[in-house]
Image: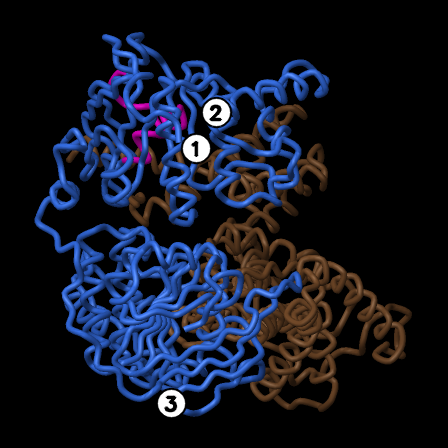
Amino acid sequence: MAASDNQGRRETAAPAIELKGISKAFGPVEANKDISLSVAKGTIHGIVGENGAGKSTLMSILYGFYKADKGEIIVNGTPTQIPDSQAAIAAGIGMVHQHFKLVDNFTVLENVILGAEEGGLLKPSLAKARKHLVELAREYELEVNPDALIEDLSVGHQQRVEILKALYRHADILILDEPTGVLTPSEADHLFRILENLRDQGKTIILITHKLREIMSATDTVSVMRRGQMTATRKTADTSPAELAELMVGRKVLLRVDKTPAKPGKTILEVRDLKVRDDAGVERLKGVSFDVRAGEILGIAGVAGNGQSDLLQVLGGITVATGTIRVNGDAIDLTGRHSDGQSRRARGIAHVPEDRQHLGLIMDFFAWENICFGYHHDPKYQKNRLAMDNAAILADTIGKMERFDIRPPNPHLPAHSFSGGNQQKIVLAREIERNPDLLLVGQPTRGVDIGAIEFIHQRIVELRDAGKAILLVSVELDEILSLTDRVAVMFDGRIQGERITAETNERELGLMMAGMNAEVA
Amino acid sequence: METMPRWADVILVPLINLVLAFSVAGLVVLAIGQNPLDAIYFMIKGSLGSTRGIGYTLYYATNYIFTGLAVAVAFHARLFNIGGEGQAAVSGIGAAVVMLAFDWPHWALALPFAIIGAGLFGAAWAFIPAWLQAKRGSHIVITTIMFNFIGAALLGYLLNGLLKSPHTQNAETVNFPEGAHLPTAHEVLAPLGIAFNKSAPANISFLLAIACAVLVWYLLWRTRLGYQIRAFGKSEAAAKYAGINAVRITIVTMLISGALAGMLSINVVVGEQERLIKEFVEGAGFVGIAVALMGRSHPFGIVLAALLFGMLTQGGFELLFEMPAISREMVLVIQALIILFTGALNYMVHDPVERLFLRRRKRKA
């Protein structure tokens, strides 16, 4: 690691970025209200806030995707207009998006010069870029093989390419949007070392994240956004996660889940040697076996894309598989006529899918139409053999909205009008109130605000305490550690290991997530 | 997400589209040295100015309601059924077989069976592309287009062979039994003391079309099947999550769609021609696409849009007659412009109008 003291930091009068009175409205929604922000040169500045607090809008204004309705952007002491991303790049601002913007079948070098080619022929640009890339890699410890194809690189390395792309365009100010969402803990640590390095060389970093732990460990200063406004700016050393959470939500929040030790009963779910191939013939699950018992929460941890999603989809009846799954002792059909979602529901399996917007909800359907989604054959929703009893569904929806505090409590709004947290509550209300024997939950709090996380976690624990089996898939280690009773780590389509949650820690799980521990508990 | 009031979406925007379409069409008429106001006058007078005109307008509108509903039902399952033309053509065979099978003593007896015959044949013609789509992934747009040609060829083949009337050189069947003649608008309205033109082809099939519109509405928004069709159309992935059988929904939806397209032959073959002829569909299957687009795939909107297109068709014929300088192609251009503005360019008007509404609302707030 490079020198992490402040020797490289230059004290300059003008801040790297200064925003004055930025406002932006989308229709009647004010995404940003009179935001002022000052980021000193050579610092790492964190921006935290709940989903929909306006972080992304603000950064999009800074990077030229949106135009502010009001306000001023001052870069290095000069008022600057940023009408598009080209102007942002010219002003020395670079952005690393949450979802990488890389061409998979191009090499690193080709990706780096994409959009910055000089002249009609590629060869001179490539040669120049290669030289420059080597210098950058040395200077900032950003080693990547310039001739490797993007699709062959790990996610962590792909992210480095994104950073290199920005540096190649002479960015002095780097914006990173939720950069650790797809990284293992050790990859994230490496990223933060790189960022510290960049800062020590005089670059300015703006880090957008919802993970308070990262803010605490990586930033120098932090700003909190809530409902489109900048509510506070603190020196990181002078604040705490509890204070930041409170500033984000506007009230005190429980960061820990309140729960008693599990009282596991009989085995509800038995999975043996489960194998799945995707459409391309690639084996996504390579023989997975585990049990979930009544009254316990089994967490499936792992970096996204190691088979957890496939596991949920098989259990939920979305994809076919080979192997054995028993629920309450009876084997269920994995390939035949009774391998669909309806049959799974009939066997007492409820499924809160990872991707609620594409699987769990029909975004254009009204809330009440979504409340019976998947259970539209339930006799209580039928008026006669043909017609559904819309009045009964509506009444059910109103009750669920009340019990799950879904806001606004209007069943006639389409799902896309609700915030991420409330969308998730619609799905949870529907699935949990079926009182299933087994609840499958994927990323229950992804894109959900902190206030709602607390509520969702409580409901899941309540279901466990009612003696139900719960399988929780999450890429958030914090969530796994605080919510589950046992944890299985998936790596490359296999269960890398199983631990009692209370007897393990982030470090051990992190190693297993990286595939480094092969022993099976 | 805020949107503009619903009335603006379903009435104001289509209206602006129409005005725009007529303005551009007017420019075209101007360009060939004719008076656009005269053209509009003749079109309106020709389609609504007499009971004869109204009778033709309703007759065409009936066809367009059937084909528009056919497209719309499929569209709700995100299936683009371009094959209304072929399904309607083949349904004529079903209708004719039923009508020629007995010496029907009364239309009320014949009609239900004709509906079943036409519906079954129309549905059967939609079944093959539906099955290919559901099971083999063959794109339904391609297959239904191809089935239009096969359907037309099949109809021509049968009319020159098996079904051909021995009494004529033309490719057509013998006349249907006279007892099964469907009451025309004139015959229905005369007892009520309303004088309606005797030669106008509008018949009680119009009521069947309205009934179909109501049934389609009920199917889509009240039944479990309709719920599944709409869910499948909005998100195939979510439908799979919910355990909705994609193969079943695709096939059932297309069967309903094909059967609706097949109702066209009740109006044309049973109601008007009273025998099966070649090319009786006359492009109504394709107009149905525009009708469904303009009607926002909602039965109520489809009835309105079908009436408008009925006016355009009938008015267009009158225009040809009254203004010789305007050719048949020119009428097609005018009709095409309306399709273009109401269908393809809808969002050109939709979005600015929505912005206007939201800005006004904000100022008020």
Q: Is residue B178 above or below residue A429?
A: below
- What's the residue type where badge 1 is placed? Val
Q: Nearer the viewer, residue A253 or B142?
A: A253
Q: Is residue B111 above or below residue A505?
A: below
Q: Secondary structure at mark 2?
A: helix
- Chain B, colour shown: brown
> Residue at label 1?
A96
Q: Is residue A61 magenta?
A: yes
Chain coloured blue:
A
Residue A328, labelled with which disc? 3
Marks 1 and 2: same chain?
yes
Q: Is residue B43 above or below residue A506?
A: above
Label 1 or label 2, whichever comes before in sequence order: 1
From mark 1 to mark 2, how far is it between C-alphas? 8 Å
The chain holding disc 2 is A
Q: Nearer the viewer, residue A71 or A127?
A: A127
In magenta, the rendered stretch is: A55-72
CB-based contact (under 8 Å), mark 2 and mark 3: no
Where is residue B197 shown, x and y percent of the image?
56, 62
Q: Is residue A482 magenta?
A: no
Residue A166, labelled with which disc? 2
**Residue at the outermost left position:** A252
